[in-house]
Amino acid sequence: MKKLITMTLTFAMVMSLALAGAAVAKTLNVGSMSPLTGPYAADGNDIANGVRAAIAVVQDEGGVPGFDEIKFFPQDTACDPRQAVASANKLINDEVSFVIGAYCSSSTIPASETLDEESIPMLTPASTNEKVTERGLEYMFRMCGRDDDQSVVAVAFMTNYLKGKNIYLIDDKTTYSQGLADNVEKKAAAAGIKVLGHDHVNQGDKDFSAVLAKVKAANPDVFYMSLQNSSSGALMAIQARRVGIKAAIIGQDAVYHPQLISIAKEASEGMYLTFGFIDKQRSLYKKFLMKYSEMGFAAPGAYSGYAFDAAYAAIKAIKETGSTDPDAIKGALMKMDYDGATKRIKFMPNGDSGSNYIIRKVDGGKFINYWNPETGSTY
């Protein structure tokens, strides 16, 4: 009988400790928003996988003190503003501490206003429209560059390297692509480059023959392609070469993706693209790349690294402050100054982290660093 009582008391103590542990166990909820389905799914899944890699690296480094688990809630925006707002509301209900996303600026802008009402920090790895960080939202941060900076580098390349005298532009009427093309048009004109035409296509179009016939007839030195995704860019490059357009083709960061080369193949050879400079010798970049590969993901896409840096920085802020309070996260983010995977992580008062665009080129079936705007020379 005495043995039975002892066993009962021991069991009760173990259960009490287990229950006490369960009571203090905490889960850090992390959200992301990006197009996981539809025409922009390649970039969207790159973003989600970048966040997954950051969480895995943090866990390898010992996790987050005070939290037993980091739980990830990826949401599909499909680059639709209404679905993006619905995704933001879903993440609010999931009680996430911060959100990485979105991809399309047209989704990020409305979704960030919904998140801001609940004081949830949002760090976009991919939305480059200037308005993203110019609305005075208290908890809005951006890891990638801005379109006004991207257009400066594109026009400098046209002027100083290509010696282009005229340009023809095409965009697909999104907040991002048209905003960027408008910036390039204004800056090109100011630089003395004659604008021969600026046309628009629709998202999802696959036949560009009508508008490309106008480009060929204009015979520009530079053909500027501002589209929302790389698959559309690949199709336009194929058709542009097919109709005999000889102009130097310049695309932007959304067209920059391994899928551009895999789809367009020879038609992508010689294309120029603006994208941020990434020093792949950084220790955190190597750690990111190794984890990304270990997790079975394909080669990092355009925004995988920026998504990794955004998630890693936000979790780092929580580790440093021991708090998920939005003001504590914001305060820690604003004090950061360290080498991330893709760039130096240091935020400005408006939440931007700075732009470091260069010109890349498709050469021999791969992207190479080609022109450095700081030196005005090729790499």
Image (spheres, rainbow, N blue to C red):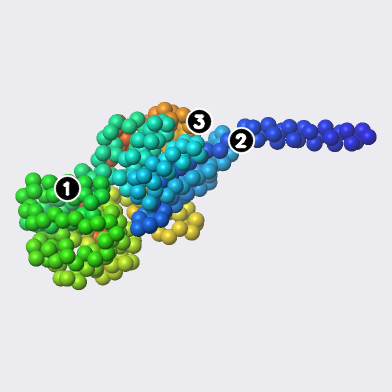
Do the CB atoms of the residues marked 1 and 2 lie less than 8 Å apart? no
Q: Quadrant of residue 258?
A: bottom left
Quarter of the image with the N terminus is top right
Q: Residues within 10 Å of mark 2 (few under 14, many from 20)?
A: few
User: Marks 3/1: CA distance?
Assistant: 44 Å
Q: Position of residue 268 (x, y in %)?
A: 25, 66
The earlier-in-sequence mark between 2 and 3 is 2
- Residues at marks 1 and 2, CA–CA distance in whole angstroms: 51 Å
On the picture, is 38 further left or further right than 25? left
Residue at image position (75%, 35%) is 14
Nearer to me, 19 or 118 = 118
Above-or-below relation of 273 to 267: above
Q: CA distance from mark 2 to mark 3?
A: 15 Å
Q: Residues within 10 Å of mark 1 (few under 14, many from 20)?
A: many
Residue extending farthest to the right is 1
Of the image marks 3 and 1, the number of the one nearer the N terminus: 1
Circle 3 sits on which residue? 322
Mark drawn on residue 25: 2
The amino acid sitting under disc 2 is: Ala
To which residue does mark 1 refer?
A: 182
Residue 231: quarter of image: bottom left
Using the rendered image of the protein, determine whether residue 9 is visible from the camera's viewpoint: yes
